[in-house]
Amino acid sequence: MNRSSSRPSTLPSVLVLAVTAGVLGGCSTLGLGSDEPRATVASSSGTSSFSEFFRNGGSTVPPPAAPVDDDFECPSVEILDGGAAMRQVGGSDVRNQVSLGEVARECRAQPGGQIAIKVGVEGRVLLGPAGSPGTFTAPVRVVIKRGDKVLVSRLQRATATVPSGDVQARFVVIEDNMIVPRQGEELSISVGLDPSGRGGDAPRKRKRG
């Protein structure tokens, strides 16, 4: 864990990153799951911004939290290799592609030497030449590790509906209250699309800040 007595407190800390996921290109053919979503925040119009959903859980701003004096450095977010996008193909044409966009994380000190981690992921569904409007599933995996040990692994199946006359829809996934011990090796946070349910087994990651 990186520490420095001269570094200002980073708790609470939020980082929003742009993730480049090639639209309708550069992805292996993958089918979309049909399981019922566990918990989702989805929108086709994007009326509420990603930052509002991540910070507040909606458009209503809650009272500001009391500042936390701590020197813990919140880990950056990484994208699982091959987990930035997936697409479905019909014949030689693309039906649709699900891709991840911005990601964010926040770390909060907890009693008993623990850390609560919150991770948000924004993505979208884009119709291809062979696609048609409808509801699509985005299986998003969030994994927190310490070294090679998986501390938390959560799969959330978000849904996004592309209405008639449109070609894309947005979705937001937020996982909160992931509690991990503060002490030990450096933590890592990974997110990615995981239609097969592999969890944290993917060996390679691409760092995104």
Image (cartoon, helix red, strand yellow):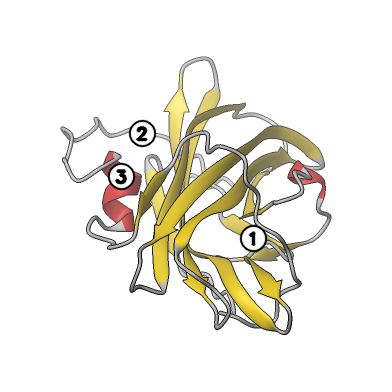
Answer yes or no: is residue 112 visible: yes
Q: Which residue lies furthest to the top in this view?
A: 112
Mark 2 residue crowding within 10 angstroms, few (<14) / some (14–19) / many (20+): few
Q: Where is residue 45 in the image (x, y as percent from the top left)?
A: 27, 63
Judge left or right: residue 190 versus residue 202. Answer: left
Q: Indicate whether 194 appears above or below 31.
A: above
So how many labels did they put on this image? Answer: 3
Q: In which quadrant of the rendered view does residue 153 lie?
A: top right
Q: Which residue is drawn at 30% across and 39% down?
A: 57
Most foreground residue, 56 or 45 = 45
Most foreground residue, 77 or 175 = 175
Q: What element carries label 3?
A: helix
Q: How far separated are the C-alphas under marks 2 and 3? A: 19 Å
Q: Position of residue 161 (x, y in %)?
A: 41, 56
- Contact, mark 1 vs mark 3 (Cβ under 8 Å): no
Q: Mark 3 points at which residue?
A: 55
Label for residue 171?
Answer: none
Q: Which of marks 2 and 3 is nearer the N terminus?
A: 3
Q: Residue at x 48, y 49 (%)?
A: 159
Label for residue 69?
Answer: 2
Answer yes or no: is residue 8 visible: no
Amino acid at circle 1: Ile
Q: Indicate whether 195 appears above or below 129.
A: above
Q: What element carries label 1?
A: strand
Q: Which residue is drawn at 47% across and 16% down?
A: 111
Q: In which quadrant of the rendered view does residue 156 lie?
A: top right
Q: What element carries label 2?
A: loop
Q: Where is residue 67 in the image (x, y as percent from the top left)?
A: 27, 34
Q: Earlier in the sequence, mark 1 or mark 3?
A: 3
Q: Mark 1 points at which residue?
A: 79
Front of the two marks 2 and 3: 3
